Amino acid sequence: MSYKEEAYLFLTFIFNTETFLNKGNYMKFSLRFNNDLPVQDYVTYATAAEKAGFDQFWISDDLFLRSAPVLLSAVAIATERIEIGTCILNPYTIHPAEIAMLSATLDELSGGRFNLGLSSGAEDFMNWVGLPYRYPRTHVVEAVEAINKLTSNERAPMDGKMLQWTEEAYLRFKSERRVPIYLGAMSPKMLEEIGAIADGGLPLLFPPEHYANVMPYIEKGLDRARRSTEDVDVAACIWCSISDDQQAAEAVLADKIAYYGHAMSPLILEQLGLTQQDFKAIDHAYHVENDIEKAKSMVTQDMLKIGIAGTTDTLIARLEKLADMGVQHMSFGPPLGPDILAAIEQIGRDVIPKFN
């Protein structure tokens, strides 16, 4: 063997070893948005996120706001590397067959960058449109089975409690791959299904340290399915509001908490010594009186601990605790900050390099 050949083999070994080691230590970062902004805003934020080094870009699909699949189509065209996803679609307002169709189509459009975020959705939304909210976990589990078959280019006959499909259930176009499915979850049973049947998980961690409480349920699902933690990408989904102006950061986080606080599960609220009753007056002010400033003024400091508000140093201090717990995917959700673009750039500059 020549000197050049020996040198080449040595360098190849070093490169592969470093790649392997770095892969194990790599922290993934993602952003999550509500679907309440103009279309062009998502294009702006997604291109900034890609430049800042984020790995994924998620958009929710809450009822009667903008359509997440349409928003993600615009994002897919405007970006090249960053993965995109829905957080979340549900099998009640969109039939699982339609979800499989749009998943395979968005994956094709994005060049294999689409992840399907799926869960049962909010019962409040179903009540708005008169849809019965029955067997939510069963509905999601059956939808996952069917969608996996369809995007794997298989026929998907189903004889379940919620889905009864014939042999004619199959995609009439070729899906480029089986589209990864991430499950959104707050309840113990749905958290368990992340470990049992999903490619990834989007558990809501309010407060962020709630990760320690949700992982045992996910691990229970992993054990049930004889899988390991390496088989599932669990995104630690937190809310944050980043700004050098502490008051401004807290104000926009308070708005988000006032809007959603009443709908949070007891499993989440009990971590902060709160109950759904604590949000009753806030909910009434926001959603009945339509007095948003009054609702925000009733959000307490304990309630603000649901998320993280402050500078990137404040954010890093809380994230280090999550990293010590074993988190390998940090996912930042709304409001992100009083200046969203600035928050994306700050996290990309100060936070991502800190962990990678």
Image (tube, rainbow, N blue to C red):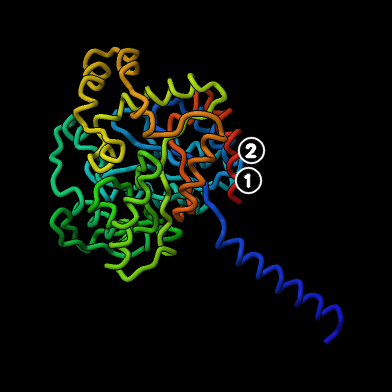
Which percent across, then down, holds residue 302?
A: 34, 29
> Relative to the observer, which residue lies in front, 134 or 251?
251
Q: Please tell me which residue is depicted at 37% across the width and 63% down the height of the picture.
A: 152
Under mark 1, the amino acid is Pro
Quarter containing the N terminus:
bottom right
Q: Please tell me which residue is depicted at 57% across the width and 35% down the height of the picture.
A: 313
Q: What residue would you read off at disc 2?
A: 349
Q: Indicate the quadrant where residue 215 lies.
A: bottom left
Q: Height in image: 248 above or below 108?
A: above
Using residue 132 as the reference point, say whether residue 191 is left or right of it.
right
Q: Height in image: 262 above or below 155?
A: above
Q: Indicate the quadrant where residue 158 lies.
A: bottom left
Q: Are marks 2 and 1 in contact (CB under 8 Å)?
A: yes
> Relative to the observer, which residue lies in front, 95 or 124?
124
Using residue 231 as the reference point, say whether residue 27 is left or right of it.
right
Which percent across, then down, holds residue 25?
A: 56, 59
Under mark 2, the amino acid is Arg
> Relative to the observer, which residue lies in front, 280 or 302?
302
- Which type of secondary structure does the marked residue at label 1 adopt? helix
Using residue 105 as the reference point, say whether residue 53 is left or right of it.
right
Q: Please tell me which residue is depicted at 27% across the width and 60% down the height of the picture.
A: 145
Q: What residue would you read off at disc 1?
A: 353
